[in-house]
Amino acid sequence: MVTQYHKKRYCFDLLKEIPGIKANYPQGAFYFFPDVSYYYGKSDGVNTIKNGDDFCLYMLEKGHVSLVPGGAFGEENCVRLSYAASEKELIEAMTRMTNTLALLK
């Protein structure tokens, strides 16, 4: 089981390719905790991202990707993204995040 989770960390490379996302490689967890504050203050013309809660709601509503605001873990600039999913689902989530965040200016 541990080996399978280590394999899924390949999506770290996909996460790093999303402009503005700062992520550390997890040492023992099954989730990433990237800093997404780059997107605070950005807008798609209708929605403006003010904080982690807004970021997560935007990603859920526009990108159909579920994230947890980092404020729940004491870090307002981050979000929690689990990689306890299939390879196909993880690749799809990274693609959706990239495309959705590209809408923000």
Image (cartoon, grey):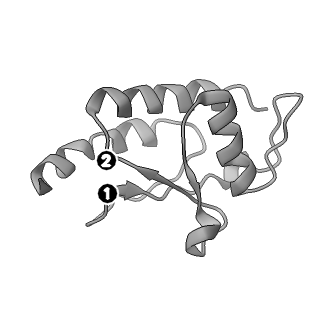
- The residue wearing badge 1 is 30
N-terminal label among 2 and 1 = 1
The x, y position of residue 35, in whole percent, is 57, 57
Q: From this view, report whether residue 96 is shown above or below residue 3.
A: above
Q: From this view, report whether residue 18 is shown above or below residue 30.
A: above
Tag 1, which secondary structure?
loop
Residue in the picture at 71% in, 55% down: 53
The x, y position of residue 4, in whole percent, is 14, 47
For residue 53, side relative to residue 43 (left or right): left
How packed mark 2 is, by other alpha carbons closer than 10 Å (few <14, some 14-19, many 20 or more), is some
How packed mark 1 is, by other alpha carbons closer than 10 Å (few <14, some 14-19, many 20 or more), is some
Q: Are marks 2 and 1 in contact (CB under 8 Å)?
A: yes
Residue in the picture at 37% in, 34% down: 90
The x, y position of residue 49, in whole percent, is 79, 46
Quadrant that contains the C terminus: top right
Residue in the picture at 55% in, 32% down: 97
- The residue wearing badge 2 is 84
